[in-house]
Amino acid sequence: MAKGIFPQMSTPDIINALAGWGISVSPEQLKSPTPDFVEGVYCACLQQVTGISHDSLREPVQNSVENSQSEDKVRRLLACAWMRLNAFRICIPPL
């Protein structure tokens, strides 16, 4: 089997495999998954495989989002200051 290729699984096979991990899903959920359903199954599988829970990721993710937003604000302020400095230089005649 080629790398990254997984065998086809039927709906009952998927339901049984997830049930083995204590994750209950219905055929309707698999047929028309919602974002919340996908997130829930993904988080349950992540916890089964790695031991990392959704709750343990919440604070680090929030901190990362807040830090990236702060960095974006600093970059915008520096870009604005740089543009104003360059404009100021153009307005002052050389000595």
Image (cartoon, helix red, strand yellow):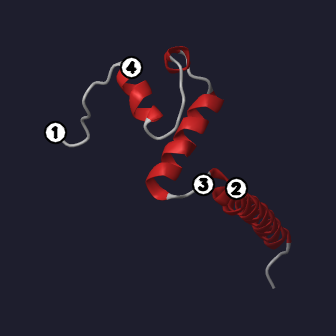
Pointer 1 or 3: first along the chain: 1
Q: Given the image, on which type of amino acid does mark 2 rest? A: Arg
Q: In front here: 69 or 92? A: 69
Q: CA distance from mark 2 to mark 4?
A: 32 Å
Q: Earlier in the sequence, mark 2 or mark 4?
A: 4
- Dot 2 surroundings within 10 Å: few (below 14), some, or many (20 or more)? few
Q: Secondary structure at mark 1?
A: loop
Q: Residue at x 60, y 54 (%)?
A: 53
Badge 2 marks a residue whose secondary structure is helix
Image-based side of 25 in relation to 77, left or right: left
Name the amino acid type tagged 3: Ser
Say which residue label 4 marks.
Answer: 12
According to the picture, the residue beneath numbered tag 3 turns out to be 53
**Badge 1 or badge 4: first in the primary sequence:** 1
Q: Position of residue 89 (x, y in %)?
A: 80, 73
Kindly identify which numbered label has been placed on residue 2: 1
In the image, residue 52 lies at what x, y percent? Answer: 55, 58
Tell me the CA gap for discs 2 and 3: 9 Å
Q: Nearer the viewer, mark 4 or mark 3?
A: 4
Residue drawn at x 67%, y 63% is 60
The N terminus sits in image quarter: top left
Give percent across and percent down for residue 91. 85, 68
Q: Residues within 10 Å of mark 1 (few under 14, many from 20)?
A: few
Nearer to me, 20 or 45: 20
Q: Are marks 2 and 4 in contact (CB under 8 Å)?
A: no
Secondary structure of the residue carrying tag 3 is loop
Badge 3, how many Cα within 10 Å: few under 14, some, many 20+?
some
In the rendered view, would you say 48 is above or below 59? above
